[in-house]
Amino acid sequence: MRMSRERRSFYAELEDKTLAFIEIENVSHVYHTGQKDENEKAALFHLNLSITAGEFVAVLGTNGSGKSTLAKHLNAILTPDEGVCRIDGMDTKETDHLWDIRQQVSMVFQNPDNQIIAAVEEEDVAFGPENLGVPAAEIRFRVEEALAAVGMTEFRNFAPHLLSGGQKQRVAIAGALAMRTRCLVLDEPTAMLDPAGRKEVLATVMDLHRRSGLTIVYITHFMEEAAAADRILVMEKGELVEDGPPRDIFRQVERMKKRGLDVPLAAEIAWRLRRQGICLPEDIITDEELVAALCQ
């Protein structure tokens, strides 16, 4: 009975969506340069944020807005100078919780080549569980399950240099899944990929979220990717300045542009057409919605 519980796919386990999985209370973070105070850079400023288990949250902001600093707080790569960051109730400043936090929150970064260390892909996915001392039979099961979840089973014995950028990012995600992570934090995971690779990675993340209820924090500069989330956070100068569903965020075209950000192309075209007197819904964010509205 115990083994069957261990081997039960974690994709079938539902999160309690009434509880905050990530809690950030009055968090500030300063990058200390070792020089005088005036040369120190405040990256987060009295940030307050709560993310519920199972949410898909996209984070937007110009360069230097604090997005990546926020991401690094979520698995205790960085800890607050002021305030508290809790992951599933665990304070990231408490070193006794560090290992548990990093098992629960996994990160995927921009460059997939910096995340793959093994000679073949299945060995890379197995690396994390091996370091946890997971029994060999359980590791094999986790590797098979994780590679299947990201559609990479047929590439399990491939060397990294034989894979595309999108495939490498899917392997990085599989490595996180093999650790039984509850939250994926992706820091611009498609920034170095071509359009096909971007589509591939986003589709993988959306599928995992839909099937497993995995908590997703997805940092991106691509507005069409952000539109796929349940909720969008907009960062500016270390502060959270917008928080809401994609339709509410992207209907504010002029406000987003003032912040130095774009909106999905369909939302901008609809906005420009409305300014020319064409009657269109204000919450269009996809190409399909724009075409349907124009054909009515």
Image (cartoon, rainbow, N blue to C red):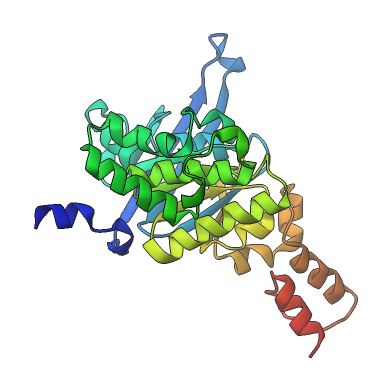
Evaluate whether residue 163 shows in this view. yes
Q: Residue at x 55, y 65 (%)?
A: 245
Evaluate whether residue 25 shows in this view. no
Instruction: Report the front residue among 78 and 174.
Output: 174
Q: Residue at x 61, y 37 (%)?
A: 162
Residue 235 location (% of width, % of height): 59, 45
Q: Quadrant of residue 275?
A: bottom right
Q: Is residue 230 above or below residue 239?
A: below
Residue 82 location (% of width, % of height): 39, 30
Image quarter of the N terminus: bottom left
Image quarter of the C terminus: bottom right
Residue 137 location (% of width, % of height): 23, 43
Looking at the image, residue 16 sits to the left or right of residue 296; the answer is: left
Q: Residue at x 50, y 50 (%)?
A: 154
State the residue lying farthest toward the right.
Answer: 276
Instruction: Report the front residue among 233 and 99.
Output: 99
Looking at the image, residue 218 sits to the left or right of residue 93; the answer is: right
Residue 164 location (% of width, % of height): 64, 42
Looking at the image, residue 9 sits to the left or right of residue 36; the answer is: left
State the residue lying farthest toward the bottom.
Answer: 296
Looking at the image, residue 39 sits to the left or right of residue 86; the answer is: right
Q: Is residue 258 above or below residue 94?
A: below
Instruction: Report the front residue among 132 and 88.
Output: 132
Q: Is residue 231 above or below residue 159?
A: below
State the residue lying farthest toward the top.
Answer: 35
Q: Quadrant of residue 12?
A: bottom left
